[in-house]
Image: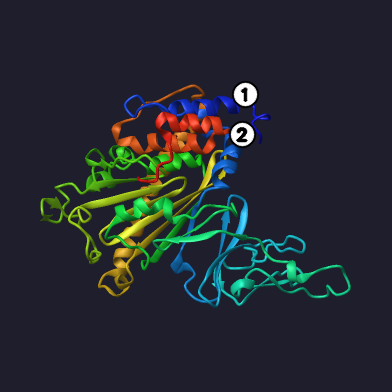
């Protein structure tokens, strides 16, 4: 959608996003409801954000061995992540180059497995996984005698990157490297190194009736502990005690300390969050004092406690729907610890309960947005990451270089220092 063909409605929504992004936190206000409901806005976001940004889709422990594969769906794209015989990871289109069949159709193929070739079940075209020939055609039955050069036929590839054991892909073949953008967050996490942690449980919620930004904004603040999670998280980590760190870029962090009533003692003046399994070694007293939350725009959240971590992946499926995937991570040695299965069950139950509570408010907010076409709200200081998210949106969605410069001048530059 070019700026020339842009509707007046979309121009208004983008203009308001730019205006609101220029406000201070103290005078900040919510975006217009249409930003969360407009099909045009959603299409613009897909083009300007989700087809250009690094998106977290999996964990490296989901494809640990040669020949392992993992199928993922990303913004209408069918993709497979593979590991070749040299240990390298690849992200390939699953669409056969013959007549566009999914080479790993979900109707007949498990989402994870192991194979030496990708073979299309329609006509038997086969693609390699090995080294520099990854994705290149290895076989095409009965194609002799036609004008066809199999050496130039291969599945499209997408940039793929690993950060702390998380796998990210980018639909833009010319994407800049991911790691430099996250160096400040890597430094911030300090003793936490999730590269070796393993996925012990995964839950998926399909077609949640809320815009993806509603989901992200809900996860980006703990203010709602006092309401939505009054009987769960609020009792353990009261929302009003949250410390939100200063940040101006694409990622944010905050600390949810355990309440004194629920603490399992004290360490150098910090309360200690009770755990069901041995905590990760080398953590600071502050890191053991509660839950550290780190978010990366546009669709990633990581909640870290001393003995486990929960990571959330949101992917939009339409203007007012999204898919949510939540996985629980633990250190490899946790599997051998006494009480592992009991702890996994308890943490899964807590995650499910918290998500159920979040579903009520996210879907309730989406209904409210549809009924309040001109309404606006104000931010608490605990909602700083939402204010920061507005600046990210303004920068990513600007339709021209001139407006991007205006956004930068208003203090919304995409700083990666945190």
Residue 281 % position (x, y): 23, 66
Q: In which quarter of the image is residue 238?
A: top left
Q: In the picture provided, is 390 more to the left or to the right than 279?
A: right
Q: Residue at x 42, y 27 (%)?
A: 22
Location of mark 2 (residue): 40
Q: Residue at x 74, y 71 (%)?
A: 151
Q: Quadrant of residue 338?
A: bottom left
Mark 2 → mark 1, Cα distance in angstroms: 11 Å
- Viewer can see residue 368: no
Tag on residue 177? none
Viewer-nearest residue: 123 or 418: 418
Which mark is first along the chain, 1 or 2? 1
Residue 225 % position (x, y): 30, 41
Q: In the picture provided, is 239 more to the left or to the right than 181?
A: left
Q: In this view, does 132 lie above or below 359?
A: below
Q: Residues within 10 Å of mark 2 (few under 14, many from 20)?
A: some
Residue 59 % position (x, y): 45, 63
Residue 412 % position (x, y): 42, 34
Question: Element under label 2?
Answer: helix
Quarter the N terminus occupies: top right
Q: Residue at x 60, y 25 (%)?
A: 9
Q: Quadrant of residue 72?
A: bottom right
Q: Residues within 10 Å of mark 1 (few under 14, many from 20)?
A: few
Q: Are marks 2 and 1 in contact (CB under 8 Å)?
A: no
Quarter the C terminus occupies: top left
Location of mark 1 (residue): 8
Q: In this view, does 27 lie above or below 42?
A: above
């Amino acid at each position: 959608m070019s700026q020339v063909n842009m509707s007046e409605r979309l121009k208004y929504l983008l203009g308001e996003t730019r205006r609101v992004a220029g406000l201070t936190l103290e005078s900040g206000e919510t975006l217009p409801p249409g930003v969360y409901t407009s099909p045009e806005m959603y299409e613009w976001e897909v083009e300007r954000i989700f087809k250009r940004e690094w998106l977290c889709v999996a964990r490296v422990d989901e494809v640990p061995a040669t020949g392992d594969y993992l199928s993922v769906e990303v913004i209408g794209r069918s993709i497979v992540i593979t590991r070749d015989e040299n240990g390298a990871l690849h992200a390939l289109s699953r669409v056969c180059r013959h007549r566009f069949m999914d080479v790993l159709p979900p109707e007949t193929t498990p989402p994870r497995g192991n194979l030496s070739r990708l073979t299309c079940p329609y006509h038997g075209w086969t693609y390699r996984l090995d080294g520099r020939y990854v994705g290149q055609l290895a076989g095409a039955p009965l194609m002799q005698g036609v004008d066809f050069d199999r050496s130039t036929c291969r599945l499209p590839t997408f940039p793929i990157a690993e950060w702390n054991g998380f796998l990210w892909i980018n639909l833009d073949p010319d994407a800049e490297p991911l790691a430099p953008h996250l160096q400040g967050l890597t430094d911030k996490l300090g003793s936490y190194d999730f590269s070796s942690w393993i996925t012990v449980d995964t839950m998926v919620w399909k077609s949640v009736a809320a815009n993806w930004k509603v989901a992200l904004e809900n996860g980006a603040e703990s203010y709602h502990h006092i309401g939505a999670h009054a009987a769960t998280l609020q009792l353990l980590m009261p929302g009003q005690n949250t410390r939100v760190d200063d940040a101006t870029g694409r990622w944010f962090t905050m600390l949810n300390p355990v309440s004194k009533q629920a603490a399992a003692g004290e360490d150098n003046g910090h309360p200690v969050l009770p755990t069901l399994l041995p905590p990760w070694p080398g953590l600071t007293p502050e890191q053991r004092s509660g839950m550290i939350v780190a978010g990366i725009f546009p669709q990633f959240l990581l909640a870290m406690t001393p003995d486990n971590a929960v990571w959330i992946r949101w992917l939009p499926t339409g203007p007012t729907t999204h898919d949510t995937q939540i996985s629980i991570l633990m250190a490899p040695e946790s599997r051998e610890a006494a009480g592992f299965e009991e702890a996994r069950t308890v943490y899964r139950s807590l995650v499910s309960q918290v998500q159920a509570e979040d579903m009520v408010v996210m879907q309730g907010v989406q209904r409210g947005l549809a009924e309040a076409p001109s309404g606006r709200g104000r931010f608490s200081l605990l909602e700083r990451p939402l204010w920061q998210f507005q600046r990210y949106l303004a920068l990513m969605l600007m339709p021209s270089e001139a407006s991007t410069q205006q956004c930068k001048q208003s203090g919304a530059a995409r700083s990666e220092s945190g």
